[in-house]
Image (cartoon, rainbow, N blue to C red):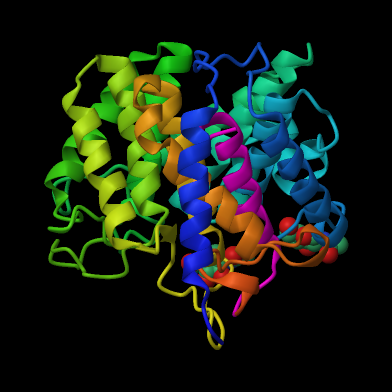
């Protein structure tokens, strides 16, 4: 297979040129109550990708696996908050939604099965559905109450006795890793920004202090997966989602504290992602492979979209940084459309090479594409 990188480069150039021609609407402060002014064409693409996600993968209670479903819910409600639609309001039918409506701590404990990173994604999905319900005059309380229950379960998994702190990855208490703690940073800081709960702010500060000194970030500015049993960086894969969730967490903590050094810390990692985890300016996970085929599992296949979503969440809190990332966001979205998308709006995981060569097509790759479009509708060129 011959890769047409020149075509991709010209897409990226076109995006850059277009971004200088279009006037981007000034960012609106994040508010769950007001639909945001966004790029209509990109939102329309997102809706097409979302429709395909429903027609191909929805089984009446979910799409993929438990934690990826949390992200799928979040992406659908993020889209509906952006475009004012109600088409994908299916959360109540999902397993996560059913648990949310029960508001039962023991049911959550059983469903989470000790997985503290899954729990972090779930808190985010519950808050997004709550935002949607508030926007539509519906009762958000079950979702907010459940988010509070799950948050407290994660917070109780903080441990000072091994590696100086951090939340355990799971209740097996064998591993401390980046994603669990990045998510706890983000939900703690953004939870404080939502509710003004001082306990959440204290958790955010202690989590960032721990992450900063943990050694999990390498000399390139990228976060490896986690720590060895002797508390050293384990050198495992710098998965792309780890480079995005840290930024949303730091953006939210910046919003809470006004400490601008947090912006520098966030962008050290965002810029390292752009410099080291791309091919021709397009995100490439290590398991993405155009020829012959990708080896990503159902977790990994979703990570690039999560990076795009968390860059969106970062920019929500630091709107004066939008111009720095706008053309990169636009280039990703363009690559998803022109390279990653197959027939009937199916989206694969290979964004960086043409004709969706080597792509897997799953609920997770489809959701990842959806997240890229929703992010670009808000902060890409139009
Ligand atoms: C539907 O998908 C979910 C995962 O999202 C799975 O847990 C459930 O078992 C599936 N239901 C059916 C009826 O296949
Ligand atoms: C729950 O976690 C245990 C320990 O990690 C694992 O062996 C088991 O398969 C999990 N159960 C489910 C339903 O995921």
Horizontal arrangement in the rendering, residue 3 relative to residue 83 (left or right) = left
Q: Main secondary structure of the magenta part?
A: helix
- The quarter in which the N terminus is drawn is bottom right
Q: Which region of the structure is painted magenta?
A: 358-382
User: Which residue does the image show at 69% across and 70% down from the upper left?
Assistant: 361
Residue 380 lies within the magenta run: yes
The correct choice, above or below, for 311 with respect to 360 in the image is: above
Horizontal arrangement in the rendering, residue 58 relative to residue 197 (left or right) = right
Question: Would residue 196 be visible to someone looking at this image?
Answer: yes
Image x and y of residue 7, in percent: 53, 64
Residue nearest the viewer, comparing 246 with 150 = 246
The correct choice, above or below, for 198 with respect to 307 in the image is: above
Question: Would residue 166 be visible to someone looking at this image?
Answer: no
User: Which residue does the image show at 52% across and 29% down from the upper left?
Assistant: 21
Image x and y of residue 15, in percent: 51, 44
The correct choice, above or below, for 16 with respect to 204 in the image is: below
Image x and y of residue 195, in percent: 47, 13
């Amino acid at each position: 297979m011959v890769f047409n990188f020149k075509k991709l480069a010209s897409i990226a150039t076109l995006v850059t040129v277009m971004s200088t021609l279009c006037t981007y609407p000034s960012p609106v402060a994040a508010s769950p109550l007001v639909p945001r002014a966004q790029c209509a064409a990109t939102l329309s693409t997102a809706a097409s990708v979302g429709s395909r996600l429903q027609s191909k993968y929805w089984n009446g209670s979910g799409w993929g696996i438990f934690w990826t479903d949390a992200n799928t819910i979040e992406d659908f409600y993020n889209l509906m908050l952006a475009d004012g639609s109600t088409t994908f309001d299916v959360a109540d039918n999902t397993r996560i939604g059913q648990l949310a409506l029960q508001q039962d701590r023991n049911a959550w404990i059983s469903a989470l099965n000790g997985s503290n990173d899954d729990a972090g994604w779930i808190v985010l999905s519950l808050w997004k559905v709550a935002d949607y319900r508030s926007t539509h005059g519906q009762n958000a309380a079950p979702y907010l109450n459940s988010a509070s229950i799950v948050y407290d379960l994660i917070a109780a998994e903080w441990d000072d006795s091994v590696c100086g702190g951090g939340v355990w990855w799971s209740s097996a208490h064998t591993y401390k890793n980046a994603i669990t703690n990045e998510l706890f940073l983000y939900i703690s800081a953004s939870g404080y920004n939502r509710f003004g709960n001082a306990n959440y702010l204290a958790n955010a500060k202690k989590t960032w202090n721990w992450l900063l000194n943990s050694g999990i970030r390498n000399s390139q500015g990228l976060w490896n997966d986690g720590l060895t049993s002797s508390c050293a960086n384990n050198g495992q894969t710098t998965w792309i989602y780890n480079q995005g969730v840290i930024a949303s967490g730091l953006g939210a903590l910046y919003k809470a504290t006004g400490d601008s050094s947090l912006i520098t810390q966030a962008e050290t990692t965002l810029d390292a992602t752009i410099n080291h985890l791309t091919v021709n300016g397009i995100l490439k996970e290590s398991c993405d492979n155009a020829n012959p085929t990708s080896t990503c599992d159902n977790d990994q296949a979703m990570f690039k979209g999560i990076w795009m979503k968390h860059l969106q969440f970062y920019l929500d809190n630091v709107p004066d940084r939008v111009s720095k990332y706008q053309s990169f966001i636009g280039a990703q979205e363009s690559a998803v459309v022109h390279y990653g998308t197959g027939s009937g709006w199916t989206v694969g995981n290979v964004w960086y090479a043409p004709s969706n060569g080597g792509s897997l097509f799953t609920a997770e790759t489809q959701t990842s594409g959806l997240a890229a479009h929703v992010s670009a509708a808000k902060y890409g060129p139009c």
